Amino acid sequence: MENHTVVPRHRRIILFPLPYQGHVNPMLQLANLLYSKGFSITILHTNFNKPKTSNYPHFTFKFILDNDPHDERYSKLPLQGMGSFARVLLFNECGADELRHQLELELSEKDVSCLVTDAYWYFTQSVADSLSLPRLVLRTTSLFCFPVFGSISLFHDLGYFNLSDNANMEEQVVKFPVLKVKDIIKTGFKLQTNSILSNMVKHSEASSGIIWNSFKELEEPGLETILRDIPVPSFLIPFPKHFTSASSSLLEQDRTFFPWLDKQAPNSVVYVSFGSVSQVDERQFLEIVHGLVNSEQTFLWVIRPGFVEGSTWLESFPDGFPGERGRIVNWAPQQEVLAHEAIGAFWTHGGWNSTFESVCEGVAMICSPFYGDQPLNARYMSDVWKMGVYLENGWERGEIANAIRKVMVNEDGKEIKERARNLKQKLNVSLMEGGYSYESLESLIAYINSF
Ligand SMILES: O=c1ccn([C@@H]2O[C@H](COP(=O)(O)OP(=O)(O)O[C@H]3O[C@H](CO)[C@@H](O)[C@H](O)[C@H]3O)[C@@H](O)[C@H]2O)c(=O)[nH]1
């Protein structure tokens, strides 16, 4: 899969990821893909959460915005958890001059064709405009989320954020019939979030085009309408099918469990991981532990440092847990795990990368979303693609065990797994010459070459 063939370099592309795992991964996968198509690559990055540059000797890295450790504006902001997102807001407010300076330097020395930035770096649009540099946007979630994120004011006007306790949460969402009102509540978005999201949407729509880590069949129904309403070209490229995200991991990946995984029967292990930012409290943690025990299935569980609030969680393990039936690791090479024949299902939080990596490997899912796009992904996964179970009622050991058994053991599971494999097959066909994904990549390259 990984192919860094040496070809004559075309023009340079400058890419600027948001400094979070779920955003760095797809941007560096895209960078590898563009490099494999002959472009030279410069990565602009904050010092905060920077990836291991030695894994990318073929790229040039420039560190910006929080370069000066003595700059109080940055040094006072939290480095961990959701609070660290304040950095992104600050950079959006005050990063324009520095970005312009960096871009001018690059433009004076090199033949730059365009800038690609994460959609949340919305301040970059006016800087790129002022330099007459085309800006492409990388949106790291699904396409079907985009108009939902742009409708927060509508949801507010409909009263979704002020519902009484006896309101019908199962009701279809106005404009988005696949979704239920409770999915919108679960995003956690409120009117306060509106300006970030609307800036993200507005400046993405003012760019030269949007690149999505996705593929056509996954975005149905409604793809045509969404594409028609976005005023700039869209390119749907399934990055995990071209490059893995292993080299942009911000945490050390444990590989010591592979000899154990290799010994497990095909389709017999549940892979459990909830992404790079979500956290549970000790009660929820205990429900996960007992849900796994009660499911009587073999599992590989990623417990990221900081995943459990509090420090006494190890004491919550029942005697003998996990024993031979499970392995617990800090962080894993996730895509490689999902591709392993022993994996029978993925219990995930439904972050877009995890969801999509599971789709790419044809692995059925159990989904426990936390917030943001995750409940929307979970709804599509269970009600549209029908390739898994959405744990809609939170963290309860009985429901967890039932959901795992439904996918892994019960008769229903066979159909669920079959649908997961079919979706993977559709994607593989779409990647072949003449297929939608193949053509989308070709047209992206032709588009960039036209700048
Ligand atoms: O042990 C692990 C666990 C995860 N990963 C990788 O980490 C990434 C996690 O990304 P994602 O599944 O999208 O989850 P988050 O880290 O939670 O991502 C944030 O960013 C995503 C993209 O915008 C959103 O969809 C999510 O809701 C948001 O929380 C994936 O590429 C995984 O392969 C590993 O490499 N090893």
Image (cartoon, helix red, strand yellow):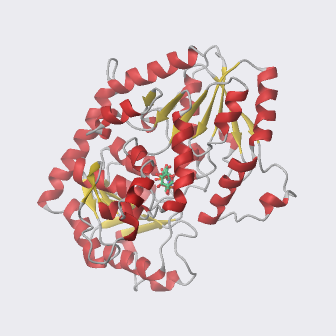
Tell me if 146 is positioned left or right of 124 in this view. Answer: left
What is the x, y in percent for residue 212? 45, 36
Residue 232 visible in the picture: yes
Q: Nearer the viewer, residue 169 or 422?
A: 169
239 is higher (above) or lower (below) than 372: above
Seen from the viewer's position, the closer of residues 322 and 23 is: 23
Compared to 446, does 159 lie above or below? below
Q: Nearer the viewer, residue 410 or 41?
A: 41
x%, y% of residue 349?
41, 60
Q: Quadrant of residue 166?
A: bottom left
The answer to which of 35 and 114 lies nearer the viewer is: 114
Q: Position of residue 429 (x, y in %)?
A: 28, 27
Residue located 52% across and 55% down the image? 194
In the displayed orientation, state which residue is furthest to the right. 70
Quadrant of the image occupied by residue 87: bottom right
Q: Residue at x 34, y 25 (%)?
A: 436
Compared with 381, 130 (above or below) is: above
